[in-house]
Image: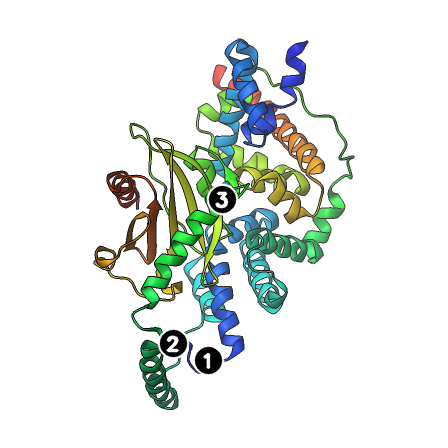
Amino acid sequence: MFYYVGVSEADRQLDSFEELAMPLFDQLYNFAHWLTQNREEAEDLVQETYAKALKGFSSFKIGTNFRAWMYRILRNTFLTSRTGLKMTMTVPLEADEDGPELAIERDTPETLFFEQGNRDRLQNAIDELPLHSREILLLCEVEEMSYQEISETLSVPIGTVMSRLSRARRALRERLRPKFHKEAGTAAL
Amino acid sequence: MVCESWKTKLDPYVDGELPEQETAAFHMHMRNCPSCAADALARVQIKRAIQVAGKRFTPSAEFRNRMQQNFVRKPQRSFGMGWMLAAAAAVFLIVGILTFGYLGNRSAGDQVLSEIADLHVATLASSSPVDVISTDRHTVKPWFQGKIPFAFNLPELQGSDFTLLGGRLTYLDQAPGAQLIYDVRKHHISVFVFQERGLPAKLDENFLSSKKLPFSMETWAEGGLRYFVVGDASAADIDQLAKLFKAAA
């Protein structure tokens, strides 16, 4: 480990940060792009997130959940940005205490929809979701975070995670349903 | 009406968030309830579709380069640094000779193996030996994301005598790593995975053959990672599990 001989504390910290943070680069970028819906803004957001995380890295407790920590910084940075503020203002405040959703039907339009491989349409439907629904759906399904990790990332209780997730899934199905009917109707003609 | 209480648990079930006992009870319920079984299947299908569709954006090569320039440190080997390295090497050599004389035959490699054995024993003695309890490698592997600075593959165990019990975060010389616990014929085996560069000593493949250890153990390096398989199971079982890991890597 001669490499470390004579390096400064700041360099050592950058090494540790690099080891933990750079493997998350692609997935953070993906999440940032989903939030901002714009490539340049996503790049700025990721860059700012890494800069803030590095600056505050000394406060990060090694052994705790680094991924949740990074996502929390990214999300908070986004929410305080111009785009984030604008998006937050357009999201209706809904009560988090919605009851859990009951079962979905079998052979629903949305399951048939997925089976037909309509990935683009699914992506568009996710894009149209309100910010709170989109982010929780992506953290759960794409980032495969546990409820506990999502709770840490969004700084909300686990009960809120569950109700928001349930509402996001319901909202997604609502958005897919009319599209499917429209597609099916066009095809029939 | 009995179903209604189960249906509220469909989301936590497909997300793998139901407690173990409730999951088992739900499995039993689904055997007799086609409605709940079909609902669960539909939700899993939706989940998978979002998982695929959600991985949509990748950073451009320019942006990746820019980030690496800003956040990845390059070794700077200037002339002055070269002298410093040489001086440091000389100091290390002297200290190393003195330390070697002081510690006798106890090498850094021995200490690594002792620590690995200690970690294995301490885990088995713990009241909560695993942080993530699952026999499913697709549950255990993602659990480590963000907790350790590397990724690794877990082998498919179908057709083998091994059962995955779960995993936990572990540390060796302050470097984070993964510990997987397996069961074979009522013996527990730990598989440790660390970054090779984070280990306090370099171990070669023949290192173990000259050692008398209280456990069966195998170690090897692949893709920058160092694997240790340790347990009181037979050497053949340890070897078999090691082979499964090597094949999965």
Q: Chain of mark 1?
A: A
Q: Are marks 3 and 1 on the same chain?
A: no
Q: What distance separates the C-alpha of mark 2 from that of mark 1?
A: 8 Å
Circle 3 or circle 2, nearest the eye: 3
Image location of residue B44, percent across then percent down = 51, 26
Image location of residue B120, percent across then percent down = 42, 48
What is the crowding at mark 2: few (fewer than 14 residues within 10 Å), some, or many (at least 20)? few
The image quadrant of residue B10 is top right
Residue at the (61%, 62%) spot, across then down: A60
Q: Is residue B99 left or right of residue B123?
A: left
Residue at the (30%, 65%) spot, across then down: B202
Task: Please say whether residue A106 is visible from this viewpoint.
Answer: no
Local secondary structure at mark 3:
helix
Mark drawn on residue B78: none
Which quadrant of the figure contains the N terminus of chain B? top right
What is the crowding at mark 3: few (fewer than 14 residues within 10 Å), some, or many (at least 20)? few
- In the rendered view, would you say A35 is above or below B164? below
Q: Nearer the viewer, residue A128 or B38?
A: B38
Q: Are marks 3 and 2 on the same chain?
A: no
The image quadrant of residue B80 is bottom left
Residue type pointed to by label 3: Ala
Q: Is residue B87 left or right of residue A40?
A: left
* Residue occupied by mark 2: A3
Callouts 2 and 1 close, C-beta under 8 Å: yes
- In the rendered view, would you say A64 is above or below B6? below
Q: Nearer the viewer, residue B177 or B51?
A: B177
* Residue occupied by mark 1: A7
Q: Nearer the viewer, residue B237 or B242?
A: B237
Image location of residue A68, percent across then percent down = 59, 51
Q: What distance separates the C-alpha of mark 3 from that of mark 1?
A: 40 Å
* Residue occupied by mark 3: B125
Task: Please say whether residue A94 is visible from this viewpoint.
Answer: yes
